[in-house]
Amino acid sequence: MAHVEIRKPDIIWIEYRAGADDPDRYRCRWANFEFDRENYSLQIMSIHGNFEYGWHPIQPESFINLCKSFDSDYLLSKISESTVVSSQKTYDNLLDLIADNCLEISNSILPEGWKTNIKDIVDENVSSSDLLFFEISNLFHQWNFDEIADFEIWECIETKYPFSARVVVEVYMKYIKPELYKLEE
């Protein structure tokens, strides 16, 4: 037998629209923030994509009070993953790893233009730390850098949050969070 349930969740909807004179209008034109107070979930729909996360209800703290306590790093870690390779930092870390471990090894083969080769691999793989690791690991094996452990390569790869998530969190912190303090609880 079919079961039909009607739910009327307790949701607060806060809309952000950049004004014509707003200096942030080129970064984010619009975003909608949906705070589900009953289910402790935040859903963000924006020009940069959709983000969402749900928390376990904390009693007696209200969901809005919980949302008031978010800082940028915390909210980013909930709605996104740090997956975009920070190319310059990663490149510098890999050069340091080679300098610290491999330049004195007699059987290592560093071809001419090896720094450019590493830079190109890093730049071509900024969207995937897994693929970057695979490419650098293979390259190091070709150069007989077998004494470098996989975890050392992983430690060189620095990532950051995608631009879209960072912008949405900036909007939250600058425009939405102050509005939460105006709500009656």
Image (cartoon, rainbow, N blue to C red):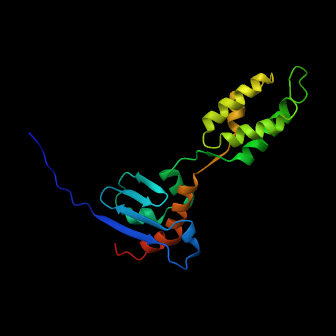
Question: In the rendering, at what x and y percent does residue 166 appear?
Answer: 56, 58
**Compared with residue 101, is residue 161 higher up or lower down, i.e. above or below?**
below
Q: Residue at x 42, y 52 (%)?
A: 53
The quadrant of the image that shows the C terminus is: bottom left
Front residue of 20 and 73: 20
Question: In the rendering, at what x and y percent does residue 2 appear?
Answer: 11, 42
| Location of residue 95 by image quarter | top right
Q: Residue at x 22, y 60 (%)?
A: 8
The quadrant of the image that shows the N terminus is: top left
Q: Residue at x 42, y 53 (%)?
A: 52
Q: Residue furthest bottom?
A: 21
Question: In the rendering, at what x and y percent does residue 18 appear?
Answer: 49, 73
**Compared with residue 84, is residue 11 higher up or lower down, i.e. above or below?**
below
Q: Residue furthest left?
A: 1
| Residue 160 visible in this rendered orientation of the protein | yes
| Residue 149 visible in this rendered orientation of the protein | no
